[in-house]
C-alpha cells in the first residue's frame, strides 16, 4: 500500500503546488490515485489555510475528495489543529461526515480518549508513533492497540544520512505492535530513504507534499501525483533487489 499525504500542515508559504481548498484537494487526490496511490491522508483547512477539525471544514473536504476517488480517505487529529484535548474530543464527536480513518498521535495528551471516541464512531484509527517520543511505550501499554487499523511509524529524523537508522530503531521500539499492519514513512530529508527502507522490508508507506516537497534528486515536485509515481518506482526497485 502506498498512501498519499496531500498537504499536511503546510500552507500557502510552501508554494501554490500544495493543495488547500476542498476543490484543490479533490483534484490532487484524483491525480495521485491515478498515479497509483491506494489511500489518502489529508489535513482539512479553514478558509485562512489553517488545519482544522471543525465539522464545517471537514465535511466539504471529505465530500469533495470522495466525489473523485474510490479509495479510503483519512484525516489528521493532530494537537496543533486543536491544542486542548477536551475541545479536540468534542470536535471529533461533532463530526457530521466521517472519514474512513484518522491518525492519532499517541504521544499527544488525550490520545487514548480520542482514539476510543473514533472507534466508537466506526472510524479506523491510525496510531501515529513518532520517533523521538514516548509514543511507542504508551502504545505498547494501550488496551486499544489490538483495535487500531494500523500503526503509522513516523520517523521525525530529517537527516538523509541517519533517517534509515532512526527508522530501524523506531521499528525495534514498536516490536510486534499488537500484530497490526505498519506503515513506515519519513519526512523532508528522511522521506526518500525511509520510503526505500519500507520497500526493502515490505511495509506499507506513504509519500506526498506533507512529507516532502522534492524528488529524490532534489528537484522541486510539481504535484502529489509526481511524488506518488516516483515513490512507486523507488519502492518497487528496492523490492526487486530484496
Image: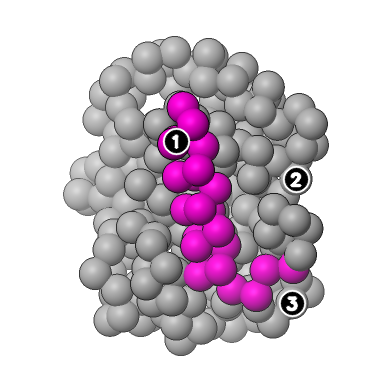
Give the left or right position of residue 223, taking residue 189 as reference: left
Dominant SS type (magenta): helix
Earlier-in-chain disc, 1 versus 3: 3
Q: Depth-wise, is mark 2 or mark 3 nearer the camera?
A: 2
Q: Are marks 1 and 3 in contact (CB under 8 Å)?
A: no
Q: Which residue corresponds to the image point at 41% horizontal and 50% vertical from the top-left?
A: 2
Callout 1: SS: helix
- Asked whether residue 231 appears in the rendered view, the answer is yes
Earlier-in-chain disc, 1 versus 2: 2
Q: Depth-wise, is mark 1 or mark 3 nearer the camera?
A: 1
Q: Dot 2, how many residues are within 10 Å of its Cα: few (below 14), some (14-19), or many (20+)?
A: many
- Residue at numbered disc 1: 239
- Residue at numbered disc 2: 189
How many discs appear?
3
Q: Depth-wise, is mark 1 or mark 2 nearer the camera?
A: 1
Residue interval drawn in magenta: 220-242
Q: Distance between the residues labelled 2 and 3?
A: 18 Å
Q: Dot 3, how many residues are within 10 Å of its Cα: few (below 14), some (14-19), or many (20+)?
A: few
Nearer to the camera, 59 or 86:
59
Q: Going by the picture, which residue comes out furthest to the front?
A: 241
Q: Is residue 108 above or below residue 100?
A: above
Earlier-in-chain disc, 2 versus 3: 3
Nearer to the camera, 20 or 155:
155
Image spot of residue 148 (x, y percent): 30, 34
Q: Which residue corresponds to the image point at 34% horizontal and 42% vertical from the top-left?
A: 125
Q: Is residue 54 above or below residue 201?
A: below
- Residue at numbered disc 3: 15
Amino acid at each position: 500500500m502506498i498512501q498519499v499525504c496531500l498537504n499536511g500542515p503546510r500552507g500557502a508559504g510552501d508554494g501554490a503546488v500544495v493543495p488547500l481548498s476542498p476543490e484543490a484537494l479533490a483534484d490532487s487526490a484524483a491525480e495521485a490515485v491515478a498515479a497509483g496511490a491506494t489511500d489518502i491522508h489529508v489535513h482539512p483547512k479553514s478558509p485562512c489555510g489553517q488545519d482544522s477539525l471543525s465539522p464545517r471544514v471537514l465535511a466539504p473536504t471529505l465530500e469533495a475528495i470522495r466525489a473523485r476517488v474510490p479509495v479510503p480517505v483519512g484525516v489528521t487529529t493532530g494537537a496543533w489543529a486543536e491544542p486542548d484535548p477536551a475541545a479536540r474530543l468534542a470536535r471529533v464527536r461533532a463530526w457530521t461526515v466521517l472519514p474512513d480513518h484518522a491518525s492519532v498521535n499517541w504521544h499527544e495528551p488525550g490520545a487514548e480518549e480520542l482514539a476510543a471516541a473514533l472507534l466508537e464512531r466506526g472510524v479506523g484509527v491510525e496510531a501515529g508513533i513518532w520517533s523521538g517520543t514516548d509514543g511507542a511505550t504508551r502504545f505498547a501499554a494501550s488496551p486499544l492497540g489490538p483495535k487500531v487499523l494500523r500503526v503509522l511509524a513516523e520517523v521525525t529524523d530529517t537527516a538523509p544520512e541517519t533517517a534509515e537508522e532512526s527508522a530501524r530503531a523506531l521499528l525495534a521500539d514498536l516490536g510486534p505492535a499488537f500484530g497490526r499492519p505498519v506503515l513506515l514513512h519519513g519526512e523532508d530529508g528522511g522521506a526518500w530513504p525511509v520510503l526505500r527502507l519500507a520497500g526493502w522490508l515490505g511495509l506499507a508507506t506513504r509519500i506526498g507534499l506533507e512529507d516532502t516537497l522534492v524528488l529524490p534528486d532534489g528537484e522541486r515536485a510539481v504535484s502529489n501525483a509526481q511524488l506518488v509515481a516516483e515513490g512507486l518506482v523507488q519502492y518497487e526497485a528496492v523490492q526487486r533487489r530484496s
